[in-house]
Amino acid sequence: MLRLALILKRSYPRLAGFASIPLIRLIFALARLLGPERAAAFGGGLLRTIGPLLPAHRTALANIRAAFPGLPEAEVRAIALSAWDNLGRTGAEYAHLDTLLDYDPEATGPLRSEVEGIEHFFALRDDRQPGLIFSAHLANWELPAICAAKFGLEATAVFRPPNNPAAKRLVEEVRRSTMGGLAASGPGSAFAMQGVVERGGHLGQLVDQHFTRGVVVNFFGRPCLVNPLLAKLARHYECPVHGARVVRLPGERFRLELTPPLTLPRGADGTIDVPGAMQAMTDVIEGWVRENPGQWLWMHRRWRPDMLPKVPPKAVPSQGNVTSQAETTAL
């Protein structure tokens, strides 16, 4: 009996996750019925209400205060509420990922989405060489992968599966029906990602979250750890690196932006400097977040000083020239 109790105790979170499958699918179906505008408004309103009651809200407030020292408290809380609103909208929009991106370069009428830098998408698609794309958890961060698939760019998106089995199954179903290749992060995933580049494909990755075995960079003036995979691949394969972001616009509309290829710093031997390259990408992301702070995922514990190396390498100074190049998005 004790053994059974122990098994049940260990299995409860997983069993609870599977038990929530019908509920999550019901919510998904209701979001489909509501349509994209009403579903997004409902999701945003729900998390604006619930979010401030959650422990993650304290993390968000602390992060915003540290990133923007001296910002009035009312503005700090307004950014946090906007971030919850964006997260709720993004969750509700999963039911409509197949219709959110209606961009057509030949269209003359009003559209839900617009793209700046479509010529870079086409160049990546047609240059017959591998390419790398970094992005961040801004607005609806799923849309760049959908755009790549829509315009025939062979791209594999790296994603972290949700912990909840029901959410994981549903999200993977939606992603596979709207995007190109997918690679789940985890043990052994780096080899699969390297294989994508070796075959001449394109790899996209969100690089704005903590990575325990990462390299040290400065983000909003504070050291943090970032996954160096894209920089290592860029150094090994000498392939271009672009940044992609999404901006949420009024009226449930979106703007996708793809930067020109970044000029990454190189070492004395002429090869791409991995920490410097990741700092350059991080600088671009910081510029994006500063422009639309309410559309970033502040609830994530991006800065974890207790997990930095005991004798940390000197974080690479911000590359102001690289940031300004991407912020212009004269794409």
Image (spheres, rainbow, N blue to C red):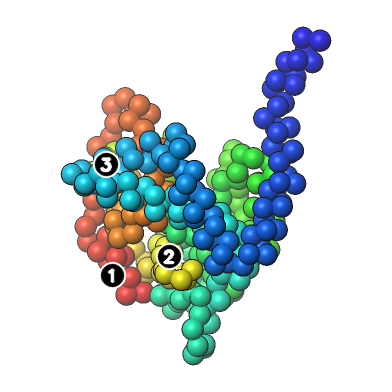
Q: CA distance from mark 2 to mark 3?
A: 23 Å
Sooner in the amino-acid sequence: mark 2 or mark 1: 2
The residue identified by callout 1 is 328
Element assignment for label 1: loop
The residue identified by callout 3 is 65
Asked which quadrant contains residue 243, the reply is bottom left
10 Å crowding of disc 3: few (<14), some (14-19), many (20+):
some
Name the amino acid, label 2: Arg
Quadrant holding the N terminus: top right
Question: Residue 9 versus residue 127: which sits nearer the camera?
Answer: 9
Question: Residue 132 versus residue 44: which sits nearer the camera?
Answer: 44
Q: Residue at x 44, y 34 (%)?
A: 55
Q: Position of residue 187 (x, y in %)?
A: 59, 38
Sooner in the amino-acid sequence: mark 2 or mark 3: 3
| In-image side of 238 versus 168 (left or right) | left
Foreground label between 2 and 1: 2
